[in-house]
Amino acid sequence: MSLNLEDIAKISGVSRSTVSRVINGHPAVSERTRKKVLQVIQEQNFRPNLAARALVTHQTRTLSLVIPQAIAYAFTDPYFPTLIQGVTAKANEFDYAVMLWVGSGDEEDRFAERVMNNSLFDGVLIASAVSDDLLIPRLAKAGFPLVIIGPPPQEGLNYIDVDNQRGAQVAVSHLIRLGWRRIGTIAGPQNMGAARARLEGYRLAMERAGRPVDETLIVYGSFDEASGYLKMRALLQRKVDAVFVASDAMAHGALRAIHEHGLRIPEDIAVVGFDDLPMSASTTPALTTVRQPIQDLGSMATQVLIDLINGAVSEPCHMVLGAQLIVRDTCGATAL
């Protein structure tokens, strides 16, 4: 016969309400009592009725991670699996499940209806938000627990971001100090805040070094390897001798285009990326890049969302993590 809360309370020698508080992570329980109840739960192999718990607590213990991009893009970019690892690991610590949702356009509108009207989730994380996102303003207006991973598309939102502008500025300044003259950039899509900030970092580095910003040396990719390859081929026709690429995925495509063109890296042309994805250390040659703590982004954003759900932090919550230049072989520094 399956046990219920009253049975666990009787075995533990505490009240039913105390068992309920332990199961739901309520802070008003002594550590000694919490351990005692949890031990009984483990010994009896007790599994709470999640549906009944949701009715009482008005919580589903489920979070949604939303990636408003095309499915093919999301799962070919190694950034997202790393981010998802950070989200799910932190959610597991607090006994939350995570549902991944990938979509765009009208699909986001329908998703918002389901979130707000059906109580499917306790909160939502949104990664790589675009400026014309339909979901974010609806959830924000409704006061639904929401955290943006990356630059927020509007003011007043909770977000965890990386200092994209500063990271890009440091990378381009590094190329300038090494003596490269015609420094181009493969920027990301400008409807994304991170891409705009990285392009601004490129411009600032050039301007502060007294270099004119040549608009013909700025091309725009899609944060994927294929666009990096195509845009690098365009820059090679414009005689660049160095390039700052706004993502490692695009940088990998750029390296391939340079090799096919018969140029040596870094003797003929230097390359710096942004992300420090795991495979960037094993490219030929190894990619100099800006490291952003992708897994930490996911983990910290999830922690903030859980704290918001439980009323442990006040809104709006803003956090910006640092980015670090990782010098390897593609910039020419190791040859000096």
Image (cartoon, helix red, strand yellow):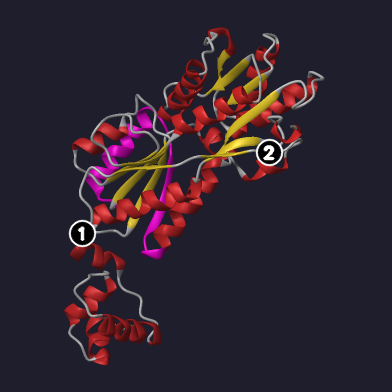
Q: Which residue is mark 1?
A: 58
N-term mark: 1 or 2: 1
The residue singled out by tag 2 in the image is 328
Amino acid type assigned to the residue bearing label 2 in the image = Arg
Displayed quadrant of residue 236: top right
Span highlighted in magenta in the image: 93-121
| Dot 1: element | loop
Label 1 environment density (alpha carbons within 10 Å; few <14, some 14–19, many ≥20)? few
- Residue 326 as seen in the image, left or right of residue 170: right
At 54% from the left edge and 33% from the top edge, which residue is drawn? 73
**In the picture provided, is 245 more to the left or to the right than 7?**
right
Left or right position of 133 against 179: left
Q: Height in image: 313 above or below 20?
A: above
The answer to whether residue 14 is above or below residue 231 is below
Residue 39 counted in the magenta span: no
Locate residue 51, reporting x and y percent.
28, 64
Question: Which secondary structure, mark 2?
Answer: loop
Query: Which residue appears at 35% of the width and 55% of the height?
Result: 303
Query: Residue 54 at x, y = what percent?
Result: 24, 62
Residue 113 magenta-highlighted? yes
Q: Nearer the viewer, residue 199 or 89?
A: 199
Q: Quadrant of residue 94?
A: bottom left
Residue 129 lies, in percent from the top left, at 39, 33
Callout 2 crowding tier (Cα within 10 Å): few <14, some 14–19, many ≥20: some
The answer to the question of whether label 1 and label 2 lie on touching residues, with beta carbons closer than 8 A, is no
**Residue at the extreme right of the image, as rendered:** 262
Where residue 71 appears, as percent x and y from the top left, is 51, 35
Answer with the quarter of the image where residue 255 lies: top right
| Disc 1 to disc 2, C-alpha distance | 51 Å
Q: Amino acid at mark 1?
A: His
Nearest to the observer: residue 45 or residue 318: 318
The quadrant of the picture occupied by the C terminus is top right
